[in-house]
Image: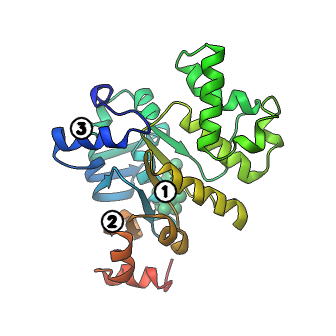
Amino acid sequence: MVVENAGTTARNLDATREWLERNLNSTAVIETERFSFFYGKEQALRDVSLSIPLDGVTAIMGPSGCGKSTLLRAFNRMNELYPNTRSGGTVRFLGQDLLKADPVAVRRHIGMVFQRPNPFPKSIFDNVAYGPRVHGNRNRAELRDIVEESLRRAALWDEVKDNLKKSAFSLSGGQQQRLCIARSLAVRPSVLLMDEPCSALDPKATDRIEATTRELAKELTVVIVTHNLQQAGRLSDHVAVLLAEGVLAEFGPTKTVFEHPCNEQVADYLCGRFG
Ligand SMILES: Nc1ncnc2c1ncn2[C@@H]1O[C@H](COP(=O)(O)OP(=O)(O)O)[C@@H](O)[C@H]1O
Ligand SMILES: [Mg+2]
């Protein structure tokens, strides 16, 4: 995959920015152009064109069923795992057509965390070591370093460092979600996709995930789906608002979109008048 040559390593935003500016004259990591998506005959996304900036957190918002998860899954080819689907338009990652790339390579570069924490029925250590092992790393010492680094980045290390052999299911919901973040980070992706990662968590666990997400955004690109307006306001630098039937109604810096939405329907949505 061409992205191997792109000089992207996790925690190296400056190198990626320089590469993007030099080669693509932009700072967009992921770009969709008139992207549409269908489940059978039902259209879930309509001609969505948007650029996810390298820096900061981008939130995808909108009422239930408007296509947020579908759009997020288009960014790492997870949609293909559903039968009977088709797409139109393009999705590019670092300038390269994602739909023509190797899906395994794509998912190494673009990790994902889901709505409900979904640790494997394995130990804490083995959950985090899973990705590196799949990619062929069998070196005990290296794996130990990667597990520690990933758990630290996910702000979970101090809580689990003495219990790495314990089952992941022994953790609380919030800890399990941070474990899933650590598992994604272990293959050192350059983008982390998060689909309503706090929707199954209490307010305290939500705070921890939000703080962790802000920290991570200093090192990689974060795209988060949320239907929580306050969370998008607190957490994101840019926001995309999808409305009914998968139409992208607005995209821009969060402050601008919240304070001066240029679309009346978006204004209604942001005032909580629907959705
Ligand atoms: N696996 C699927 N099979 C068929 N239809 C789906 C599937 N996933 C989502 N959809 C439909 O696509 C539309 C967008 O869904 P989704 O992306 O999950 O929206 P959101 O995440 O904003 O709630 C909805 O109408 C939903 O019913
Ligand atoms: Mg969803």
Looking at the picture, how far across and down is residue 123, in whole percent?
77, 30
Q: Is residue 95 visible?
A: no
Snapshot quadrant of residue 56: bottom left
Report the residue marked by disc 1: 224
Among numbered discs 1 and 2, the one appearing first in the sequence: 1
Residue 19 is marked as 3
Spatial distance from mark 1 to mark 2, Cα to Cα?
16 Å
Circle 1 SS class: strand
Image point (42%, 85%), residue name:
268
Image point (54%, 74%), residue name:
230
Q: Nearer the viewer, residue 246 or 178?
A: 178
Q: Nearer the viewer, residue 274 or 184?
A: 184
Looking at the picture, how far across and down is residue 137, in whole percent?
56, 16
Q: Is residue 165 left or right of residue 226?
A: right
Task: Check contact, mark 2 vs mark 3: CB within 8 A.
Answer: no
Report the residue marked by disc 2: 248
Task: Check contact, mark 3 vs mark 1: CB within 8 A.
Answer: no
Among numbered discs 3 and 1, the one appearing first in the sequence: 3
Circle 3 SS class: helix
Image point (82%, 34%), residue name:
163
Looking at the picture, how far across and down is residue 212, in whole percent?
58, 53
Task: Check contact, mark 1 vs mark 2: CB within 8 A.
Answer: no
Snapshot quadrant of residue 238: bottom left
| Residue type at the position of mark 1 | Ile
| Residue type at the position of mark 3 | Trp
| Residue type at the position of mark 2 | Leu
Spatial distance from mark 3 to mark 1, Cα to Cα?
24 Å
Image quadrant occupied by the N terminus? top left
Q: Is residue 260 above or below residue 164?
A: below
- Between tags 3 and 1, which lies in front? 3
Spatial distance from mark 2 to mark 3, Cα to Cα?
28 Å
Q: Is residue 89 visible?
A: yes
